Amino acid sequence: MLDMAFASNLGYLMNKRNIFSFLIAITGMLMVLISGYYLFLNPSQTPIQRVFVASAHGLAQTDPVPPINIDVPNLGVISTPIPILMFHYIRSVSKADDPLGYDLSIEPELFAEYLDRLIEAGYKTTTPAQFLTGKVPANSIILSFDDGYTDFYQVAYPLLSQRKMTAVLFAISGFLDDKDGRYLTRTQVKTLSDAGIEIGSHTVDHANLAETDTKRIQDELLISRQVLEQITGKRVGAIAYPSGKYNDDTLRLADYVGYSFGVTTEPGIALPTSNKLKLPRIRVRGGESSEDLLSSIKRLTTVNQ
Ligand SMILES: [Zn+2]
């Protein structure tokens, strides 16, 4: 009797439909365990990266981005005052074609003249990462380019390269490879990085970091950094806050997620006493002659020293 019941239960268990359900259940459990491991327990990620990878959805860059481990400490010193120039487009454009972008654009010939005048005046270009080593000459200058427009690759970089000058490019990670070709491609970013241009972050989608909630600020800062690190294979330690907007949370989180160099749009030059995450810049306007630019750099340097 007992044997009969057992055999009949066994027969029931071995029923094909039940075996199929059982296999589905086991597969589901395995998938939950494996994804749980990668999202929350993966030992190659630091605790903060785990949290951000898990909460990466909802931004323009929606793919969860596995972090790469580049073991460079978030350190650095400002040993000497330094002017940080701020550029956007280097291109010829008419006001009618791009009313908003016109004031952000500098004619290529004028840009080349700026570079030659800076060299004549004895300035040596450096990057944020080199600068934070504290081992740069006193006549150093940083040229920074916001937004990551294609003309940086086509126009500005060749002019810099001919003169053996360097720069930092603040790219918007979620705008790369846009269908209109206004922004750089990932391949161009990688080429520039390999050629010695430092790639910094300008967030995922040019968010206003003074008016978004804390979680969004975290995501903007960290995801853009991870995406750019994946493209370049180098540590991304510099950030330019979009439109120069930030608040106390932005500065705290920028430090927390590993930035060691942050620039605003406030006018001035960076000093050894400056907060490394709140460095002022000198905005270069389209109509400015190279003499005007040189004298405003000198004036700010003298005022600040
Ligand atoms: Zn911008």
Image (cartoon, rainbow, N blue to C red):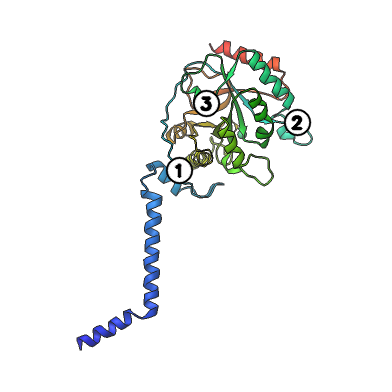
Q: Looking at the image, is mark 1 or mark 2 earlier in the sequence?
A: 1
Quarter of the image for the N terminus: give it: bottom left
**How far apart are the two marked residues, 3 and 2, measured between alpha carbons?**
28 Å
Q: Quadrant of ligand 1?
A: top right
Count of labels shown?
3
**Residue at the disc numbered 1:** 67
Residue 22 position (above or below residue 206) = below
Q: Nearer the viewer, residue 9 or 188?
A: 188
SS state under label 3: helix
SS state under label 2: loop
Measured as percent of width and height from the top left, residue 227 is found at: 52, 42
Residue 118 position (above or below residue 228) = above
Q: Quadrant of residue 48?
A: top left
**Residue at the disc numbered 2:** 92
Within 10 Å of disc 1 (Cα), the crowding (few <14, some 14-19, many 20+) is many
Task: Name the kind of residue labelled 2 in the image.
Answer: Ser
User: Which numbered circle lies on residue 128?
Assistant: 3
Task: Name the kind of residue labelled 1 in the image.
Answer: Pro
Q: Looking at the image, is mark 3 or mark 2 earlier in the sequence?
A: 2
**How far apart are the two marked residues, 1 and 3, measured between alpha carbons?**
22 Å
Q: Outermost residue toward the bottom?
A: 1
Residue at 36% of width from left, 58% of height from top? 33
Residue 277 position (above or below residue 186) = above
